[in-house]
Image: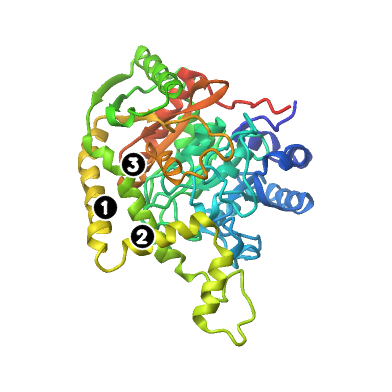
Amino acid sequence: MSLVNKQLRYVVEAVRDNREALSEYIYRLYERIERYEEKLKGFITLRPADTVIREALEANRLGKPLAGIPIAVKDNISTEGIRTTCASAILENYIPPYDATVVKRLREAGAVIIGKTNMDEFAMGSTTETSYFGPSRNPWDPSRVPGGSSGGSGVVVSAYMAPAALGSDTGGSVRNPAAYTGIFGYKPTYGGLSRYGLIAYASSLDQIGLMTRDSVDAALLLEYIAGEDPRDPTSLDLRVGGLFKEISSLGEGRDLPKARLVIVKEMWSGVEDHVFKTTMNAVDKLSSEGFEVEEVSVPEVSYALPAYYVIAFAEASSNLSRYGIPLYGLSKDPENTSWIDYYSEIRSKGFGKEVKRRIMLGSFILSAGYYEQYYIKALKVRRLLRDRLLPLLRRGYIASPTMPIQPPRLGEAIEDPLRLYAMDIETVIPNLIGSPAISLVAGFANSLPVGLQLIGPPLGDRDLLLIARTIEIIIGLSNLSPQMG
């Protein structure tokens, strides 16, 4: 039986000390990529099969715990010697001289990088349509978007072109495509994974996350990449030792842990009917299996989305100011050109429309006369949300639809910025308050997967993943296979 459609943990065990099985597995992955990549466009850079196999066999020979398994990496996470573009023309040929900490730790554990996945340019978007290299497509319906900004990572995991992928999550960019492509998405507590080597969008919101077939595979990888990093002063010592063994044993003669689900009414208003019904059916099923359900009102939640975008745009305008100097990617002959003209031309050619829009709005937000009116006020809303929501998270997990609508068709949302931004209304809250959050499959509507989001308390990642596994067992929807022909 082919290992391609098996979860990561089963593949690791099957190929450990079995170089022939590992080679065969990787060949099968590349056969699948050859068959579907042209249609789905999950990768920006795909490494040659012989190079990946050679590195994988060496890791396997050395007895490393991940045994040479290929992992995909979002194209805004630095990979030494492998092109890293942020899906932008301005970094089209940039090759980093170093690995991000999470990539370094994966390699040390015996994983091999298979390629860099497509994304919204500089992670600015919710559909993967702002990519300079063209949009990715949803394996469940190629006429629809796979979500974003980590859309390519969602595509390659959902379509069995890689067993797992790294993504980044600034306001839902791991959970959004996880929901739309029918996989598991995990955003850790802010600082739970090192951001060293993650090309910044909004530094106080950015977090590297995991996209896998289910919560057990996420726990397996998390044990190898979590932990404090001296190169990232915001990193935390996230305690996840033994989590994989604990989560793997759930449902095998052990009582499943139960929890209280907190329904914040404002997070369910305005949700598309099909999404609302599917997600609430999942909550009802959990209630019948012993989960407590509490409904509350938190009016301040209505301010989360504007506060998020004010903060994100302001930080983006600062972080992206470095691009345009001749150190990175796109450049031109500076002869007989003033510095201002050079800088302006490179940025005009190198950045796409959505990135320019966010930089300009961010610069306006930070300008004299508007800094306190917008940015400082948004920071106050952020603190207010944290003060209102943390007491709820001390007694339960906030449950909501991951996305308020089903995946739009290509072109439907990208030309309407307000509609595009409103897609993030459910997912920005964990980033604002620094909490961990997951998205798993709640059910289906119109033959498309619908995601259930759970938000936990800061540093409550371990228990959140255990509860996520319980929900996967009860609902019975994980490791799903889209019919792609």
- Which amino acid type corresponds to the residue marked 3 in the rendered image? Ile
Residue 232, quarter of the rendered image:
bottom left
Disc assigned to residue 314: 2
Whether residue 27 is visible: yes
Marks 2 and 1: in contact by CB < 8 Å?
A: yes
Which mark is first along the chain, 2 or 1?
2
393 with respect to 154 (left or right): left
Can you say which quadrant of the picture contains the N terminus? Answer: top right
Seen in the picture, residue 406 relative to 109 is either above or below; the reply is: above
Dot 2 falls on a residue whose secondary structure is helix
- Residue 429 marker: 3
Residue at (67, 44) in percent of width and height: 41
Left-right relation of 305 to 344: left
Callout 2: 10 Å neighbours few (<14), some, many (20+)? many
Badge 3 or badge 2: first in the primary sequence: 2
Inter-mark Cα distance, 3 to 2 = 18 Å
Across and down, in percent, residue 42 comes to: 65, 44
Q: Are marks 3 and 1 in contact (CB under 8 Å)?
A: no
In the picture, which quadrant includes the C terminus? top right
Is any atom of residue 219 visible in this view? no
Instruction: Give the foreground label among 3 and 2.
Output: 2
Where in the figure is residue 106, as x and y percent of width and height? 57, 51
SS class, disc 3: helix
Q: Residues within 10 Å of mark 1 (few under 14, many from 20)?
A: many
Decide if residue 222 is on the left or right side of residue 302.
Answer: right
User: Label 3: few (<14), some or many (≥20) within 10 Å?
Assistant: many
Tell me if residue 130 comes above or below residue 84 in the rendering.
Answer: above
Please state the horizontal and vertical placement of residue 457, each as a whole percent of the image.
30, 39
Q: Mark 1 and mark 2: span between their CA atoms?
A: 11 Å
How far is mark 3 from mark 1, CA to CA?
Answer: 13 Å
